[in-house]
């Protein structure tokens, strides 16, 4: 029987960017409603087994409390610290338990943590964060329908999904961490407030995707050369800073946060080839992964970046529903 995983992050959309920009806040009750609609979609196509991550707001448990739902709901048996590590461990356990597909609610950071836990779980990522490129604005009911049909084997995963890309971050030759969309190097020496919100603190950015219709660092790269999920490789750009001896060769305007569209002076940029490591000039800095500062490095350490298409398959909900309709998967037999 098909088994679907659900990871819902109650902290998504509640970071500092909602204060320094015009970022939206997705309240817990709406996240509960989205999860409930996912479950109703799953149930409508005959999938009623869910393995979920516990969270501090009990989003999934509250979502399951509905007279129209008859779900076999189980929670991952791990200690809850209500941190990013919970998502990493939950995704790893879900992969071990044989989850067929994973549904996430959160932003780029939530999904990065899930992929750190398992790079193999097919995913539908529902956007409930602030600056999102990896997750999309998709109706929960439709997500549940698509995921249920894939998890149950009635849709061919390869036909309705695209393998995602990751940016591997190496420090002194060892893989240190990954990002799904962007790695940013900051002049700040300490992690402090994790969310990146001040573009003036950054000096170099590496992207797996540069989407013109996105917010954040990806949108800046898209003004230089658009790189989609389907395109191979990635993009690197350096931000001009006269104090560091980097003059601007061009200036673009880009929405780096909701309601924030500043001019950004670009010193240089280049496309990144798939699987080729890019060696970065040594300096003291912090490394931000998918919009959040993660760790610091010193000028004695060597950083390298590498974009690869070895992330999880991302289910295209619209395509999945189109294929399902063409195959008559929504047609009931006479008498049903």
Image (cartoon, rainbow, N blue to C red):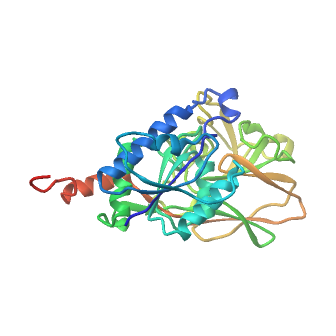
| Residue at x 82%, y 47% (from the top left corner) | 191
Percent x, y of residue 77: 61, 60
Question: Can residue 235 be seen from the camera position used here?
Answer: no
Residue farthest along the left direction in this orientation: 334
Percent x, y of residue 148: 36, 57
Q: Is residue 198 above or below residue 158?
A: above
To which quarter of the image does residue 280 belong? bottom right
Q: Nearer the viewer, residue 287 or 38?
A: 38
The answer to whether 254 appears left or right of 303 in the picture is: left
The answer to whether 153 appears left or right of 174 in the picture is: left
In the picture, the quarter occupied by the N terminus is bottom left
Q: Nearer the viewer, residue 302 or 10?
A: 10
| Residue at x 68%, y 69% (from the top left corner) | 277
Q: Is residue 159 above or below residue 37?
A: below
Percent x, y of residue 84: 68, 52
What is the number of callouts on the image?
0
Question: Can residue 264 be seen from the camera position used here?
Answer: yes
| Residue at x 58%, y 45% (from the top left corner) | 107
To which quarter of the image does residue 298 belong? bottom right
To which quarter of the image does residue 279 belong? bottom right
Percent x, y of residue 130: 59, 37
| Residue at x 41%, y 46% (from the top left corner) | 38
The answer to whether 127 appears left or right of 183 in the picture is: left
Q: Is residue 12 above or below residue 88?
A: above
């Amino acid at each position: 029987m098909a088994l679907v995983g659900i990871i819902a992050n109650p902290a998504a959309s509640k970071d500092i960017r909602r204060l320094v920009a015009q970022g939206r806040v997705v309240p817990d009750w709406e996240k509960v409603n989205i999860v409930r609609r996912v479950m109703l979609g799953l149930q409508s196509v005959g999938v009623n087994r869910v393995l979920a991550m516990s969270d501090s707001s009990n989003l999934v448990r509250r979502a399951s409390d509905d007279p129209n739902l008859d779900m076999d709901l189980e929670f991952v048996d791990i200690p809850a610290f209500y941190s990013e590590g919970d998502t990493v461990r939950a995704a790893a356990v879900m992969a071990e338990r044989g989850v067929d597909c994973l549904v996430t609610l959160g932003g780029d950071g939530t999904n990065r943590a899930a992929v750190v836990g398992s790079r193999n779980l097919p995913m539908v990522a529902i956007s409930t964060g602030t600056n999102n490129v990896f997750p999309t604005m998709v109706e929960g009911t439709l997500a549940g329908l698509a995921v249920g049909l894939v998890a149950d084997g009635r849709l061919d995963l390869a036909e309705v999904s695209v393998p995602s890309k990751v940016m591997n971050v190496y420090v002194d030759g060892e893989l240190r961490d990954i990002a799904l969309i962007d790695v940013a190097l900051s002049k700040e020496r300490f992690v402090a407030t994790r969310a990146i919100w001040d573009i003036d603190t950054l000096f170099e950015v590496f992207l797996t995707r540069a989407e013109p219709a996105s917010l954040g660092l990806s949108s800046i790269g898209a003004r230089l050369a658009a790189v989609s999920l389907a395109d191979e490789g990635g993009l690197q750009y350096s931000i001009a800073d006269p104090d560091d001896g980097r003059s601007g060769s061009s200036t673009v305007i880009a929405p780096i946060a909701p309601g924030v569209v500043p001019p950004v002076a670009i010193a240089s940029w280049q496309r990144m080839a798939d699987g080729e490591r890019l060696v970065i000039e040594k300096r003291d800095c912090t490394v931000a992964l998918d919009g959040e500062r993660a760790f610091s490095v010193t000028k004695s350490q060597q950083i390298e970046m590498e974009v690869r298409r070895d992330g999880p398959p991302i289910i295209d909900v619209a395509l999945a529903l189109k294929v399902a309709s063409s195959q008559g998967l929504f047609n009931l037999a006479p008498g049903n």
